[in-house]
Amino acid sequence: MKQLKVALIGNPNVGKTSVFNALTGLNQHVGNYPGVTVERKVGTTTLANDTKAHIIDLPGVYSVNPSSKDEEIALKAIFDASNKDFPDVIVVVAEVENLKRNLLLFTQVKDLGFPTILALNMADQMEKKGISIDVPALEKALDTKIVLISARKKEGINDLKQAVLNYTKYNTNSIFDLKSIDENYFTLLGHLYPNENPYKVWLTQTGVFQFEKLSPVVSSSSAVQKSENELKKLQQRETIKRYQFINEILKDTYRIDTSKATDIRMKFDRILTHKFWGYIIFFFVLLLIYGSIFELAAFPMDFVDGLFADLSAWTSANLPEGKLTELLADGVIPGLGGVLMFVPQIAILFFLISILEETGYMSRAVFLMDRIMKPFGLSGKSVVPLVSGTACAIPAIMSARNIENPKERLITMLVTPFTTCSARIPVYIIIISLIIPKTYILGFVPLQAFVMTMMYVLGFLAALLSGWVLSKIIKADRKSFFVIEMPTYKAPILKNVFLNMYEKVVSYIVGAGKIILALSVILWFLGSHGPSDTFGNAEEMVAEKQMNERLTEEELASEIAGYQLEHSYIGIIGRTIEPVFRPLGYDWKISIAVLTSFAAREVFVGNLATLYNLGEDAAEDETRIIDRMANEKRADGTSVYTFATGISLLLFYAFAMQCLSTVGVTKKETNSWKWTFIQMIFMTGVAYVTALIAYQLLK
Amino acid sequence: MTLDFLKKSQKGTIIYVNEEKVPLKLIEMGCLPGNMVEVLQIAPLSDPIYIKVNDSFLSIRKDLAKEIEVELI
């Protein structure tokens, strides 16, 4: 079977992804370029009975001069003959509306000497937008093959496949004369490198690419040395000249009635970027996102939760008793459940975000939010992860992927877990009920609700302040500018939305899932195993201790569970490091609960219940735990849960990185253990210090 | 005057682009001397601005708009 390599390149927002999806369907996967986080999207399609094509989807670019590290890596892979992604043919995807700008990129790619096909997308919209194109004349002028397609209506995709099959028939001559930029300079370059593609030589001079080593035939090349500024001037001149060249061609081949095309845009923009209504609408969009992942996702999440609980119970009941069954039933299956639990939230969030991106709304939101987020080192787009983070940090961190600027993306991922996620709520409720009296401020605002609200505010403030700090510390690998396109409004293509959702879910399960599973099995082991002389004899020890008391079976079981957790490995670690937590006001029981809740914050309540011998079921019964905690005394007879301890705990849980799933996702998304550890240490450090200060001041 | 001084719905012709400060990307999108530029919207807090140039619709920050000189039409 014949194998072809095809690269798809094009401006952002021209529907390149739709074309890619139409060609490959589910036969696609997203990986990374070796050693970096830059996405590498490839898929396969069958062109004819005996020919298969590997399609490489490049990030949207306006020219072959990369404007970010991501673009540089992706473009380099395509243009370098020694790279495995080096294509046999390049398809430049353009849209009919802003053809002029699309052709700038086309002429550059063509000049690099590739067999090049121009796919004009959204051809079905031409009449509606008042556009007419003389295709044969344009083909002749650009010396290329043009295919009219509509990825939305799946029209012309077979024509495109056919055109790719015929790739050897296309001329690979360059069409733009570089000498029109600077006669002397480019003549000289031509003399020095007579056997090389002139455009490739020029791109090597500007330093954007180091292709395979180009060696000049004349040894002295000092005459071609130009300063960075001179090169930039030449690049600007190249752009001007190319536009002149393109305008000349389009004059005879392309007509557009711009008033038709801009009419809809103006109508929507008037409301969506309005200085008052724009924010109101954005607020409701955020509310919808938050509500969907908080409320809507709860049903499938409960289902997954229940399913895995049943599966775990079934496994331990039906498999032969032993260590392996225990590992499977109590370690691996609940761990898997913990991984899959987040799938509904991820799916829903990316469903909504894809729609926002596809319709063109996201750019308007960025326009409204940029000035507000900029001082904190964040992008206007960071608002979505931050708000989603109030439901759950896992999908929220993943949604930062849509931020183009690498520095802003990194900062967003690092600070998002500060926002008050739903796992903190059970902890907050217990502590607030314990230490905040049921009174009213100004006679009508319940104080407890007010404190709860302040915890949310605190989460946002911590995220923003940390963003500001990190923006001062983290160095950008190159200066990046805020230039975003405001795309045309479009109805979303559901196929794109669902493929994006599917891809995010798969990459979460494959990438982050294994880390989360491994960590949760380790934590389970530490919490359910211990030295045999104490942990192993839990039943006898408890029975001996309680000899004179008459306990029901249930009470006895609770006593044993409490004893076991206390004497498990994690219990031992908790008691050992209690001195570390003592200045924060925590006794050894709280220390163990804090340590075990690294798995997930909500575990704190259940484990405290276990440690107080209330049995795990008590976690459902808040008042019982609260009563029990209120009566907990230190050795000197004073209460453990004073106002100072409570505030210290609230602050600790507000800031500390108490969630191993977040660790897994951060590792996956940053592709770096370094940033994962920095995040963990930074958050837990802030938590420790603020809790320490609060306790010492208040006690 | 520079582009950041243009008010909403005002148009101008670009006469100079400071290529030292302005990224090539913006130039490639059509922010070139000779082209017409129109300010469509200015965000609250007066930054960024939403412009139309060379049939491209872009949003750029004021600090960049300062580097583009225009002549009011």
Image (cartoon, coloured by chain):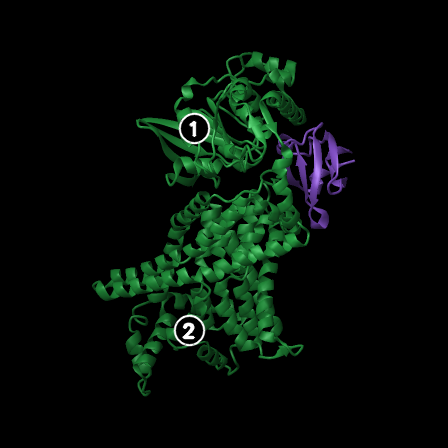
Check disc 1 and report its element: helix, strand or loop: helix
Give the secondary structure at mark 2.
helix
The colour one sees for chain A in the rendered image is: green
Relative vertical location of residue A599 with respect to residue A400 in this rendering, above or below: below
Give the numbered dot on residue A594: none
- Quadrant in the rendering for residue A605: bottom left
Residue holding disc 2: A619
Image quarter where the N terminus of chain A lies is top left
Give x and y (percent) for residue A202: 57, 21
Front-most of A215 and A623?
Answer: A623
> Looking at the image, is A432 positioned above or below residue B67?
below
Please give left or right for residue A474 compared with residue A397 in the image. Answer: right
Q: Residue at x 50, y 34 (%)?
A: A124
Query: Are discs 1 and 2 located on one and the same chain?
Result: yes
CA distance for labels 1 and 2: 61 Å
- Badge 2: residue crowd in 10 Å (few <14, some 14–19, many ≥20): many
- Residue at 76% across, 36% down: B2
Please state the horizontal and vertical placement of residue B51, each as a whole percent of the image: 68, 39
Question: Who is closer to the viewer here, B56 or A329?
Answer: B56
Q: Nearer the viewer, mark 1 or mark 2?
A: 1
Q: Which residue is mark 1?
A: A160
User: At 47% from the left edge and 17% from the top edge, which residue is drawn?
Assistant: A171
Q: Position of residue A155 (x, y in %)?
A: 44, 33
Q: Amino acid at mark 2?
A: Ala
Expressed as whole percent of the image width and height from the top left, the position of residue A457 reads 60, 63
Chain painted purple: B
Q: Amino acid at mark 1?
A: Leu
